[in-house]
Amino acid sequence: MSEPIPAPGLVIKSSEFRRGREQSWRDLEVLLDRVERRGIKALGPDELERLPGLYRSALSSLSVARAIALDRHLLLYLEDLALRAYLVVYGPRRNLVQDCKDFLLHGFPAAVQGARWHILVTLLALLAGGVAGFMLTVGDEAWFNTFVPEGMAGGRGPASTREALLSEEIFAPWPGVIDSFLLFSSFLFQHNTVVGILSFSLGIAAGVPTLILIAYQGLILGAFLALHYDRGIALDFIGWVSIHGITELGAIVLCAAGGLLIAEKALFPGRYSRVESLARVGGEASRLAIGAVLLFFLAAILEGGFRQLVQMTLLRLLIGSGVAACWIFYLGQPLAAARQ
Amino acid sequence: MTPVHIRTALFLNPIGRARREIITPEGVPLTVELADYGERVGAFLLDVVFLAVTNILLYLVLHVAGGQSVGGKVVLTIVLFLGFIVQNLYFIYFELAWRGATPGKRIVGSRVVNRRGGPLSQNSVIARNLMRQLEAFMPLGALLSVGGAGGGVWQRLALALWLLVFALLPLFNRDRMRGGDLLAGTMVIALPKRRLLADLVEAGIGTDFTEQQLRAYGAFELQILEELLRRPENRETFELRRDVCERVCRKIGWREPVPAQGTLDFLRRFYTAERAFLEREQLYGRRYEDKHSAARQ
């Protein structure tokens, strides 16, 4: 038992192993260095082809090293190499044009259809808010000032006369390109997007703030409607709002539905842990939010640009319902089976 | 990492980064080190600075290009609008294009990864960055505008509290997740950057240790010895090696005196023999974790 181990027979498994595989590690390292510095485009087509193979062989080297090697540095190096390669191989794909196309043609309508019950609940909350706002304000116009923040009322209120509303608001002249497109639209876009993202992300707080926010938007709308109804110009008001309002409300509803989707998974995680469950639905819900931001963008352009260009209520109603039909057709279209 | 490696790492650096394991789609577990809270904050602040510089440049360019003809208010509106778009797209674009790193993250050396080890999807990147709006930009913007308009103290306090809660969230969960990570199923890791160094084992080196002597130690001690041999040469290392050499000689009953200049050589020979022995034993299914389990056999 205690005679010295003969020198020629000294075989060190991990060293042999390292000698055999080292070249492929170094090859992978060279490729990774270039990708990390200059992006995946720095690789030629044949190098791109080799990358997954080298990655898998690094993984297998790591597994072998874990089993046989006691060389600490070697193991740490292989862990790092495999992780770096993993980050490159499984990083997000980036074909932005194709991705945008996929999203518009398939991803967005699919996300909307997947969340139809959440959308229904949101619509109900909006409706409830709207009815309440309308009933209260019709009875007592003082409620208008309670519901509508000053910045949004823009001087309108119980004191407004029918003529003032007609000439300064509903049939106000078009203020020109710069004012309407640049100043007004961009302000609206920012404001609406923030409201949307807020109602989306507040879903994480169990969805209650989301529903309150939505019902509040309904209250404001109801109050405005009541103000005009009392002066006998409800239809004109609806026409005026419908041009952009359909798109804008749709976007708010989608954001909130995304928030509810998150809330549902946070409250009822099912067979997953709560954190896991959130992570599973987060991506899906964020598709709703991104689509909604696009809608907000369109709404702001419609509102800032075209609302005051068309000066006839009937035509406005037609445009509004046309826009609505477009959205319903686009988002409700029967989709081929999910491709993912 | 195997248990012995984790033990060694903890012994060498008890306050290092927290480690997690992700499983690649191939089914191999990989060890990742979570980025520190300070690195997270640093990366974010860098990104905010880059965004601010972009906005200022944008303003200057537009002002010079057309400021006189359309008026300052229009320029400001355009800048605010473009700034808003840039602010939202900046993080999403870079995390997609640079495989999980914004410029700030790249400087700090951190990456976004899928917490479960799958591919990092675009949906995740979008979700985690939409939440940024809620976590940071909206309350910050509100705080600044409230401050300007002389808003109420309570309002300001509420906003500050909001910011604080989201900013501290990573400190209160295991994976250092902020709100966006929670929603997107991601976490932020420190980017590894180790290079392959030379093997400490010398081929064809003679060994004159008996199996009895080699049984004195296990894998843990072997790895600590490896770390000692890889230390940069200086006075302290030299003394440490002297000390370790003496202890080893005493433990294995080595009678020949080891001269001071021969310390490194002796330790390397011992390391080689010990590693050969332990790896061979491991191949036969006998794992000696440390000197205690080695002595029991």
Image (cartoon, rainbow, N blue to C red):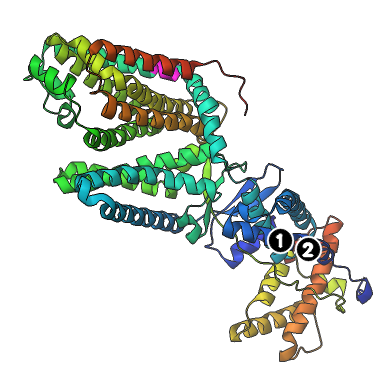
The reply to whether discs 1 and 2 touch (Cβ–Cβ < 8 Å) is: no
Same chain check for tags 1 and 2: yes
Closer to us: A54 or A311: A311
Decide if residue B193 is in sight here. yes
Other-residue count near label 1 (Cα within 10 Å), few / some / many at <14 / 14–19 / ≥20: many
Question: In percent of the image, x 69 and y 54: which residue is there?
Answer: A44
In this rendering, the answer to whether A284 lies above or below B48 is: above
Decide if residue B182 is in sight here. no
Kindly identify the amino acid type of the residue bearing the numbered disc 2.
Gln
Instruction: List the residue tagged with mark 1.
Output: A75
Q: Which chain is disc 2 placed on? A: A
Where residue A113 sits in the image (x, y, percent)?
50, 19
Query: On the picture, is B46 further left or further right than A88?
Result: left
Kindly identify the amino acid type of the residue bearing the numbered disc 1.
Leu
Residue A23's label in the rendered image is 2
Where residue A4 sits in the image (x, y, percent)?
91, 76
Task: Give the quarter of the image for residue A200.
Answer: top left
Question: In percent of the image, x 73 and y 49: which residue is there?
Answer: A49
What is the quadrant of the N terminus of chain A in the image?
bottom right
Range covered by the magenta-colored residues = A117-121
